Image (cartoon, rainbow, N blue to C red):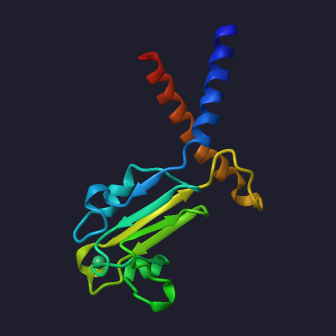
Amino acid sequence: MAASHSIIIFIATLVVLATSISAKEYIVGDKSGWTLDFDYQSWAKDKVFIVGDTLVFNYASGAHTVMKVNGTGFQQCIVSSSNGTLTSGRDIIPLQTPGRKWYICGVGKHCELRNMKLFITVLPQTMAPAPSPVATSASTKLIIPTVYGIVVALFGSILLLFV
Ligand SMILES: [Cu+2]
């Protein structure tokens, strides 16, 4: 009994720790950066993006751009000057709100023909109080990060066994 309580407290502590230190910086494409013919959906597939994390797009300035678009803009590669194009070559995008995010390159046909498009889903922070709670989405907002927290906690527990 006492032992199982300790384990629960231990895991709860890890979840809190994991949450507070979980802000990550993701280099889009890792070493390849933001470039032609890279599979960004495979890159994003095994990653968990959470509010507070940042995306970094690395590329030779002038060769590419980064534009935030909506789902239609993503599917059809719609390049619009109103989207706020980033061009620095090291574009840092803080993920400030949960939900789906779409980014494309606005140069030539890089989006249509060379796969320069990234789609991610940003999850809300586990312990952060919702700024404006919406009843219909409250349950889903809680479940996903909790699962993530448990996975992180279990992984942490396993690591500690080997220390
Ligand atoms: Cu490009």
- When asked about the image quadrant of residue 114, the answer is bottom left
Does residue 47 appear in the picture of this structure? yes
Which residue occupies 49% across, 84% down?
83
Which residue occupies 23% across, 72% down?
36
Q: Image check: 92 left or right of 33? A: right
Residue 45 in percent (x, y) is at 38, 54
Residue 117 in percent (x, y) is at 35, 72
Image quadrant of ligand 1? bottom left
Which quarter of the rendering shows the N terminus? top right
Residue 55 in percent (x, y) is at 45, 61
Which residue occupies 49% across, 50% down?
24
Does residue 1 appear in the picture of this structure? no
- When asked about the image quadrant of residue 111, the answer is bottom left
- When asked about the image quadrant of residue 106, the answer is bottom left
Q: Image check: 61 left or right of 7? A: left
Total numbered badges shown on the rendered structure: 0
On screen, 155 above or below 125? above
Residue 107 in percent (x, y) is at 31, 84
Task: Pick the residue in front: 130 or 90.
Answer: 90
